[in-house]
Image: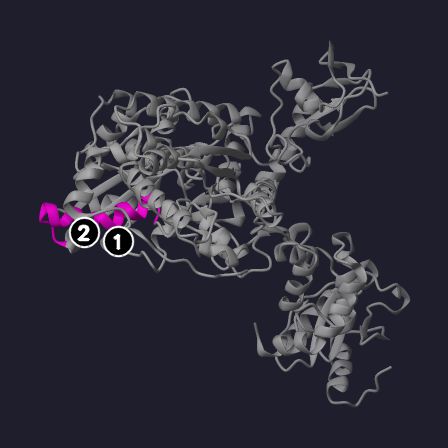
Amino acid sequence: MSVIEAKKSEEYREEIEAILAKYEGDGFALIEILHEAQELIGYLPKDVQKIVADNLNMAPTTVSSVISFYNYFSDTPKGEYQVALCKGTACYVKGAKEIIEKIEDRYGIASGETTEDGKLSLEVVRCLGACGLSPVMTVNGKAHGLLNPEKAVTIIDKYLNREMEEV
Amino acid sequence: MAKDKVNIYIDDQELEVDADSTVLEAAQAIGKNIPNLCYLKEKNVIGACRVCLVEIENTGKLAAACITPVSEGLKIQTNNKRVRDTRKMNLEFLLSNHDVECPSCLSNDDCDLRKIAEDLGIREIRFEGKKSSFKKDYSTPSIIRDPEKCILCRRCENICKEVQSVEAISTDGRGFDTVVNTTFFANLMESTCVMCGQCTLVCPTGALTEREYIDDVWDLLSDPDKHVVVQTAPAVRVALSEAFGKQAGAICTGEMVAALRKLGFDKVYDTNFTADLTILEEGTELINRINNNEKLPLFTSCSPGWIKFIEQYYPDYLEHVSSCKSPQQMFGALANSYYIEKEGIEKEDLAVVSIMPCTAKKYEAQREEMKGDVDYVLTTRELARMIKQAGLDLNDLGSEDFDLLMGSSTGAGAIFGSTGGVMEAALRTAYDLITGEELKEIDFESIRGFEGIKKAAVNIDGLEVKVAVAHGLANARKIFELIKNGEQFHFVEFMTCPGGCLGGGGQPLAASEEVLQKRMDAIYEIDKKKEYRKSHENPYIQKLYEEYLDEPGSEKAHQLLHTKYIKRGI
């Protein structure tokens, strides 16, 4: 377990225990608990999974199995800037694949990964529901549309250089 | 009230069947063989593989027979063209993402997938596409995971969860990326896996197999400088012949010994001998604990999967576990001391090989505390392969006897291979040692059989000795519940695998309950026919104590035959 993770769960321990207390060890509440824990921390570190598993009297394998099934859950820390790039049908036909390749190439991360400095993470998602803006991505929830590979990385660079305001 | 019986039609044949049965069960009851891969009676009924499809005439739909309940008037076709073609197509889909390397696959001879492909007449795989890419897991000395051969049937996952309550492996990911692996843990070695190998018994492909050490043992046997002794566990001799076409329950002790000699082992010895020895050491420990008011109940320590289990899940109870090494490790320790001293063999020239019904024994032999006493452990399956590799057929070999010094055993040693056997053997000896009288009624029927938890109370010299027996680790958990709820026992036997060693993870595959029952009957048959049926009556055990160990529980015995455990947690 990395030092960062250990610190995280210690830092949040009380709040996680408060979440667990609400559900009184009910195994059927696993998904709700994971949901709340991830809202709190931003992702689900291993030792948090273990705390949840112990509390629900479950094998840690079962907990991580559930996490792995749902795209929403993540067991790796997210970057300061989270890019969600749409690969729905409209975005796909308008060149989302090339944009993904450009981002992967420039920042050295694949979908689901975070840069080593913790600044940027990439998630390739299904339709964002903004097909009129396709190809489209969101950065920390803010939409940027009508992209091409060059435009996408220019926008991301601006965030990284703090030249772009967050919403 | 719901009806008990319903009328259905299978391939136009009218039948009355139990209302709570499935189409698959109803078909099997009339001898219809519907192919299936993921189905495992009562253990894995999830309709995952789609190979058992049948046509429901009432709706015109195809449905998986294993999960389709029967209902009044249901009409089923099990073998029309549509059913056959669709089953075939589904199997081709499975094969299109299967690492097909049958000739070199360890499961070649045991593979359900390969057999069903033949049964359905697969002659080409029409679908080509991306294949999953996963690393093999070589982290343990016991089990190899090869997810590229996995067809996601989930048998292993459910056996691990329901029978063993260990949940070392689980489904990870979704869609094309789905893989059965250790999810939370980096690999099998770091996981909660107890190495029992029950998953290798149910895996329908080569995705979960034992780690083979056959070539290493061949190397030992062809090295002229090595003196190689072999020991054979009690449950091997009642299952080995299944791999040579014999009915389950055929006893092949003599043929097995003959085969081992032909393979080139210098001495063929018996783990039953050190099973007898275990009884003397463990029985003495029990008597001492009772007399000195020490920690009770005493837990048995022969089953290495159980040991890892308690180290992980109940570390606070480790003081209850007998300090006795398992019979395999006692043998290893004695081979490296008593035997070589007696025979004048240099320690570095000696090699010890075990034939075990067990994958966890491979792990046990590698445990830091005992490493080096047993060099290689082969499963029953591996021994069968080795005999075949040597061009031998077990059925053609005459019967031979074990070598003497560490090859003599009693009926009590023999029944170690069955659930309840260690307890029964211990009671036979404890009674005699405590009372100084000879126990006449030595068959303890109440702790025999397949009941998950068995209990008995035996009056020994005025003391009501309460014992319990559990097999399958999910049942072990139940014993802890009983103890936590205040139930008192003096002695509890735990076996990792259902049925005990006879149902071990290293035994021939496809063992139904009927097969396990026959193996069990065979073990008690061996016991019955033995000249001596109590461990302390074994003349070679008596000789061992006289010449070498002094007495049970002596300092020398402790140094060689006892061990320590590790508080692991999860």
Label 1 marks a residue whose chain is B
Vertical comparison of B142 with B514: above or below = below
Front residue of B418/B72: it is B418
Contact flag, marks 1 and 2 (Cβ < 8 Å): yes
Q: Say whether residue B397 is left or right of residue B170.
A: left
- Tell me the number on the disc at residue B560: 1
Furthest toward the right, the residue is A132
Kind of element beneath mark 1: helix
- Residue B67: image quadrant is top right
Q: How is the image coloured?
A: one colour
Which numbered disc flags the more N-terminal residue, 1 or 2?
2
Q: Which residues are magenta?
A: B325-346
Q: Position of residue A137 (x, y in %)?
A: 80, 71
Tell me the quarter of the image containing the N terminus of chain A: bottom right
**Main SS class of the magenta portion in the image:** helix
- Residue B530 in sight in this render: yes
The type of residue carrying mark 1 is: Leu
- Residue B395: image quadrant is top left
Q: Say whether residue B53 is left or right of residue B461.
A: right
Q: Is residue B344 magenta?
A: yes
Which of the two marks, 1 or 2, is nearer to us in this view?
A: 1
Q: Position of residue B461 (x, y in %)?
A: 40, 35
Q: Residues within 10 Å of mark 2 (few under 14, many from 20)?
A: some
Q: Which residue is mark 2?
A: B337
The type of residue carrying mark 2 is: Ser
In the image, are marks 1 and 2 on the same chain? yes
Label 2 marks a residue whose chain is B
Q: Position of residue B157 (x, y in %)?
A: 59, 45
Tell me the quarter of the image containing the C terminus of chain A: bottom right
Residue drawn at x 50%, y 40% as measured from the top left: B198
**Real-space CA distance between mark 1 and mark 2, rounded to the nearest whole angstrom:** 9 Å
